[in-house]
């Protein structure tokens, strides 16, 4: 059998050293410091964040490292080991939405959003290196924003990020604000209409816990999540599927939810989810619209998915970790059939993982490619990964990459 491709997380000292080395080679001298932030996997609660719903991500041990040095002017110079195009240079005075192209928008966007919020952020040099896979649904974009956000918070004394002690952030309220600024950077500067779960996970998650995020009011609860203690592991399958329509499809799903909410006279679909008696009635009313058949499926996914997050957390709270498997399976079916955001690669990954003994499996992230997750007995990780790789080969798909996810510390 062919070798499996694993994407290991760097240890912190290694990531730190890589960013420092790139900084020194690019800008000469040493940075003021290195900050880092994790990617994430969402355990359940997909396409719920922009509907005011619930989500349950964990931070990954895979992190983006930013070596940063404060400057005395308003110039930002940036370089990334993942972007071979060399050093970019942007003046903060010119950095307005639409004016910064490509990956620099995520970095400059964070400085812009902090300035918009009244913080006195000036120019800086930054060198980025990362082991978070790009565009794999594991949120390399939020990891990039959050690594820069905690760096600028420290260097320009914004006072929002606090510290991380024993894998937990000391100032969650400040980080909630910082996450909101990262969302502004991504939405307004990078032009990606993402909903906020990714930034919350990267900045507010806690080691050994899943982050129950209520996107209606931004409140969180840390739910103990230690799979190893239950003899289990979470296998991540990066399908490496090309997903060229992802932004347009994502925007269409958001628009459908907004249209449904408008027709129902509610602010967000969360209100429908919170009223189980009214939700059957709401679906019936939507069915009468021109695009009723589609709207019913979209809303049914959102309403059911929010309920599944609660069911998942109830089982974790009860110590019934294997009991979350069927909830994951139901989430995948709903994303595939009602929300229509899965794709062949994700379905092959999920089906093959289950057939090889996974207790549950689902796509994670926005869909149309990206990654799937499977809950597997700890001793079966290699076997399940091999079975998934074999299924991809048999289906003539590009070989997937694998990682093992544990709930890791937040940005710091
Ligand atoms: P995901 O967040 O799922 O990985 P996105 O499309 O949201 O996928 O974000 C990927 C984009 O974020 C990249 O195309 C790039 O512009 C930017 N990005 C993420 N990580 C890095 C990095 N290490 N260096 C440079 N740009 C990055
Ligand atoms: Mg992203």
Image (tube, grey):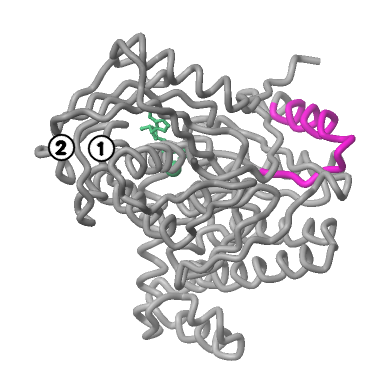
Measured in 3D between alpha carbons, the distance from the residue under mark 1 to the one under mark 2, in whole angstroms, is: 8 Å
> Mark 2 = which residue?
92
Q: Which residues are magenta?
A: 373-392
Residue 28 showing in the rendered view: yes
Q: Residue visible at 48% across and 62% down? A: 49
Q: Nearer the viewer, residue 235 or 184?
A: 184
Specify whether tag 2 is near ligand 1 (CB below 8 Å).
no
Asked if residue 256 is positioned above or below residue 138 in the image, the reply reads below
92 horizontally vs 282: left or right: left
Question: Dividing the picture into quarters, in which one does residue 399 lie?
Answer: top right
Q: Secondary structure at mark 2?
A: helix
Question: Dividing the picture into quarters, in which one does residue 144 lie?
Answer: top left
Label 1 crowd (10 A; few <14 / some 14-19 / many >=20): many
Q: Residue visible at 70% across and 49% down? A: 208
Q: Decide: marks 1, 2 in contact (CB < 8 A)?
A: yes
Q: Position of residue 389 (x, y in %)?
A: 73, 27
Q: Nearer the viewer, residue 341 or 196?
A: 196
Q: Residue visible at 77% across and 67% down? A: 317
> Mark 1 = which residue?
108
Asked if residue 368 is positioned above or below residue 30 in the image, the reply reads below
Q: Position of residue 395 (x, y in %)?
A: 69, 29
Residue 369 showing in the rendered view: no
316 horizontally vs 341: left or right: right
The residue positioned farthest toward the left in the image shown: 93
The quadrant of the rendering that contains the N terminus is top right
Reply yes or no: does residue 136 show up in magenta: no
Q: Residue visible at 25% across and 37% down? A: 108
Which quadrant does ligand 2 occupy? top left
Considering only order in the chain, which callout, 2 or 1, is on the residue closer to the N terminus? 2
Q: Secondary structure at mark 1?
A: helix
What is the chief secondary structure element of the magenta stretch? helix
């Amino acid at each position: 059998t062919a070798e499996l491709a694993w994407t290991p997380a760097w240890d912190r000292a290694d990531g730190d050293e890589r960013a420092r080395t790139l900084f020194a080679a690019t800008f000469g001298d040493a940075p003021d410091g290195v900050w880092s932030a994790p990617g994430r996997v969402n355990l359940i609660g997909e396409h719920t964040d922009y509907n005011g719903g619930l989500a349950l991500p964990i931070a990954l041990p895979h992190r983006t490292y930013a070596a940063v040095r404060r400057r005395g002017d308003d110039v930002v110079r940036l370089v990334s080991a993942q972007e071979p195009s060399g050093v970019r240079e942007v003046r903060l005075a010119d950095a307005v939405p639409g004016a910064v192209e490509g990956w620099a928008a995520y970095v400059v966007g964070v400085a812009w959003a902090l300035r918009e919020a009244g913080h006195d952020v000036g120019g800086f040099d930054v060198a980025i290196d990362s082991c978070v896979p790009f565009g794999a649904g594991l949120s390399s974009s939020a990891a990039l924003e959050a690594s820069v956000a905690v760096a600028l918070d420290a260097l320009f004394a914004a006072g929002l990020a606090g510290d991380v002690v024993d894998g937990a952030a000391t100032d969650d309220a400040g980080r909630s604000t910082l996450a909101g600024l990262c969302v502004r950077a991504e939405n307004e500067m990078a032009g990606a209409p993402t909903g906020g779960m990714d930034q919350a996970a990267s900045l507010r998650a806690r080691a050994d816990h899943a982050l129950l995020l209520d996107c209606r009011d931004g409140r969180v609860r840390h739910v103990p999540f230690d799979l190893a203690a239950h003899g289990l592991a979470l296998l991540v399958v990066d399908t490496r599927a090309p997903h060229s329509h992802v932004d347009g499809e994502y925007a269409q799903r958001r628009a459908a939810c907004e249209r449904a909410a408008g027709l129902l006279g509610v602010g967000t679909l969360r209100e429908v989810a919170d009223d189980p008696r009214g939700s059957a009635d709401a679906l019936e009313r939507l069915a009468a619209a021109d695009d009723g058949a589609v709207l019913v499926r979209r809303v049914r996914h959102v309403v059911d998915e929010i309920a599944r997050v609660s069911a998942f957390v109830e089982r974790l709270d009860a110590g019934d970790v294997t009991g979350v498997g069927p909830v994951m399976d139901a989430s995948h079916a709903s994303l595939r059939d009602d929300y229509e955001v899965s794709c062949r690669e994700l379905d092959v990954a999920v089906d093959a993982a289950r057939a090889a003994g996974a207790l549950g499996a689902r796509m994670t992230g926005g869909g149309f490619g990206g990654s799937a997750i499977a809950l597997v007995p700890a001793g079966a990780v290699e076997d399940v990964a091999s079975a998934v790789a074999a299924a991809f080969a048999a289906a003539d798909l590009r070989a997937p990459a694998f990682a093992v996810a544990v709930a890791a510390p937040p940005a710091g």
